[in-house]
Image: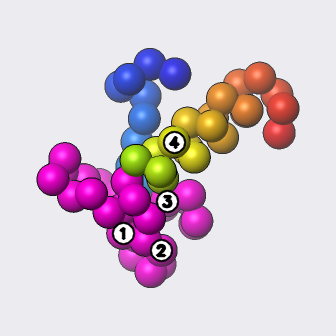
Amino acid sequence: MDRGESVPQSTCCGRVKESLSLSERTFRCECGFERDRDVNAAINIKHEGMKRLAIV
């Protein structure tokens, strides 16, 4: 994935957050899900990579 391809998306429900400033260190979703923003992004990148490699 290129750097610009990552979006702030919940790894719980899949909702995409409209904006997430760099000062926000916790990803909080409307569904109540909360996770460190970097961990959430890493999981999303892993899932995207698996989809692109047809592993999932």
Mark 2 → mark 1, Cα distance in angstroms: 6 Å
Q: Looking at the image, do the residues carrying marks 1 and 3 touch, with CB atoms under 8 Å apart?
A: no
Which numbered marker is on residue 33? 2
As drawn, the label of residue 42 is 4
Q: Which residue is mark 3?
A: 10
Main SS, magenta region, reads loop
- Residue at label 1? 28
The residue closer to the viewer here, 20 or 34, is 34
Tell me whether the residue at label 3 lies in contact with that at label 2, contact meaning CB atoms closer than 8 angstroms.
Answer: yes
**Which amino acid does the dot numbered 3 rest on?**
Ser
Vertical comparison of 51 with 10: above or below: above
Answer with the quarter of the image where residue 5 lies: top left
Contact, CB < 8 Å: mark 4 with mark 3?
Answer: no
Identify residue type, mark 1.
Arg
Q: Residue at x 58, y 66 (%)?
A: 13
Mark 1 burial class by Cα count in 10 Å: few <14, some 14-19, many 20+: some
